Amino acid sequence: MKLLTHEIGSLAKPPWLVKTSQGKELDESDIDHARKWGDKVGVEGHEELVESLERGSADPDDVALWSSRYCVRMQEAAGLDVIWDGEQRRSEMYAWAIAHANGFEPRGTVRSFDNKYYSKSAAVGPVSLAEPYHNAEFESLQPLAKARLKIPITGAYTLAVWSYDEHHIPKSGRLGAGYGRKQEVEARRELTLDIARNLIRPNLEALIELGATWIQIDEPGASTEEDELDIFVESFNVSVEGLDCLFSTHLCFSDYDLFFPAIEGMSGCRQYCVGFANYDTRELGRSAAERPGYEVISKFRDLPYAPVLGLGVLDIHTDFVESPDLVRDRILYAVDVFGDPARIDVCPDCGLRTRSWEVAYDKLQAMVEGTRLAEAELGA
Amino acid sequence: MAVQAFAPGMYPRSEALVQATRDLDRGRTTEADVDAQVAADVQKLIGVQQAAGLDLLTDGMLRWQDHFRPLLQAADGLETGALTRYLDTNTFYRAPKATGTPSLSGPLDERFSAAVPGPRVATLPSPYALARGTDVSPTAMAENVLKPALAGVDAELVVLVEPFLAHDGGSPNELREPVEALSNGAALALWFPFSDAGPLLEQGAAELPVEGLGIDFYATHLDSVPEGLDKLLLAGVVDTRSSVVEDPAEVAAFAGKLAERGVERIALVPNGDLQYVSDAVAREKLARLGQARAAA
């Protein structure tokens, strides 16, 4: 019984990419990093990159392309079945999409958590696609990747809820006026569906035209507002309806109970990639009591359109490297709950961009090894 | 009508401090460099508040990773739990997790409270917020953790931020005993950010043993304020979830409406932490807050 393993999206940008992009001088450890990882994961011709870094003449766009190749080979070396390039050529999942859209203006940097931040923009007018913004990535990865490609793309609801809205929400008259939740929700619906129809969908169509077969619509903001889940569902449907491609979504760091029953109407979604390990214990065990982080998975099992569950088994917020045995037990618990291993894929909770490459690689290797252990037991 | 203005809570880090802390996490800079940038940010923030004519000054809590972190790190019996979304924002905090009987042996490290040149407003989590999700009672959190922390705070007013009670559909009675445990020290206010405080006010929040109440007037109707409220009303008139800057004339007019309801002591404040907008937007919002105070 084969269980599919895949990454969720982002990986950290290496120091030689960050410094080159910032116009900073590299030190020997940065060049050693490029040399070591090129050797370690088998990046063809990486000596060319190392030489250009040593000369100090590397073009930032070329270096980003190299970084993309490194991440592809890193994931393949770790043994993943389905990969992307760690979003090395994107600024960030929100900023990249907004930068290629009309109708937004930047409003500065806001904290996500601890020392992590994101750029936040405001919707200031009707939204439209300035230019397809994942085509170049996809075209460069198609001939390169040995594993199957899955393109992560930030979804409409997350883009809306992570933005300020200066276009639909009144600029005055709200103070003490009981400007109600109903009006707020309607404003969000207008913005979200505008993004779905006029930004996301044309971008998806462009990718499918190029040959994309699996697109993951990332919606980490989906459960931000409990009473807006219908907007998330509607925006997903509007984005993908009638398009010929496998569509999955990624949800993370939420009270997943909130999604039910709303996502019963999201039948165009063939897989939910969901983070659970963050809520789980590190003890071994395959019973419900021993896997508290996975309590909600039966609700995904019972969805009427029987989607696959992309089971998050790696906590991406810690350098703790899960043992293969722990990964195995998490998988086997989920398979037991679902009663059908064909409906379980294996992935990290979220993108691993907050971890070093060393930690991310170790975690991914452990995930693949744990998956093989689970397969061995399931095949027995 | 006496109108003050100030800004409790967490202030956004400057773009330079954002970069410095990012660099620190990636081993590209030193603690000393980050300390220097924090000091520069604090001085700039003080200047912005003074220029706006604010009555109480804050250091902006620039070292605090969230409202609970320094307490969780300093107290025995508490640690950081799961990364959790802060209400409906896209900002997350580490939820408090109890591992034993919580106790704080003394005030927080002075790094978490930078000096300000004038009367100060300080901010701590409310006992209910700190206890939420643990098996510890809010009163025990107040007595064993917040009271020792409060003992080290030198401020005209300490604002206890309570983001969850209204969202949980709770009763103000759940705060009465824990807040009483914190009395006999600095003047206290309870601040209900990003919440319709109407139901809490209906259930007698105005009778709680605190000096002031903080109400988000972007979520709470003016009519919810009890006629003749005899507490300091921290009126949340700056919307920190919006990038639109406020019209000082509209805010001043609203202060007038509060006075018409018999509220005699009013402090114009944000409706939540300013950290939900960027430094540049927050600076402009503070300037507008000062203009509104002057016009009220």
Image (cartoon, coloured by chain):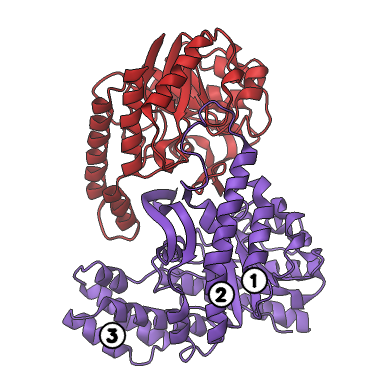
Mark 2 residue crowding within 10 angstroms, few (<14) / some (14–19) / many (20+): many
User: Along the line of sight, which residue is nearer the eye, A16 or B243?
Assistant: B243
- Mark 2 belongs to which subunit? A
According to the colouring, which chain is red?
Answer: B
Amino acid type for the residue under numbered disc 2: Leu
Q: What hue represents chain A? A: purple
Q: What is the secondary structure assignment of the residue under circle 3?
A: helix
Name the residue rendered at 61%, 73% in the picture. A324
Q: Quadrant of the N terminus of chain A?
A: bottom right
The answer to which quarter of the image holds residue B121 is top left
The answer to which quarter of the image holds residue B88 is top right
> In the rendered view, would you say A334 is above or below A114?
below
Amino acid type for the residue under numbered disc 3: Leu
Q: What is the secondary structure assignment of the residue under circle 1?
A: helix
User: Along the line of sight, which residue is nearer the eye, A175 or A373?
Assistant: A175
Name the residue rendered at 38%, 92% in the picture. A44
Q: What is the secondary structure assignment of the residue under circle 2?
A: helix
Whether labels 1 and 3 share one chain? yes
Q: Pointer 1 and pointer 2: residues touching (CB < 8 Å)?
A: yes
**Disc 1: which residue:** A240
Report, in whole angstroms, how far the alpha carbon at label 1 lies from the one at label 2: 8 Å
Amino acid type for the residue under numbered disc 1: Val
Q: Is residue A284 left or right of residue A6?
A: right
- Mark 3 belongs to which subunit? A
Name the residue rendered at 27%, 41% in the picture. B38
User: Along the line of sight, which residue is nearer the eye, B81 or A11?
Assistant: A11
Q: Pointer 1 and pointer 3: residues touching (CB < 8 Å)?
A: no
Report, in whole angstroms, how far the alpha carbon at label 2 lies from the one at label 3: 32 Å
**Disc 3: which residue:** A49
Q: Is residue A190 left or right of residue B242?
A: right
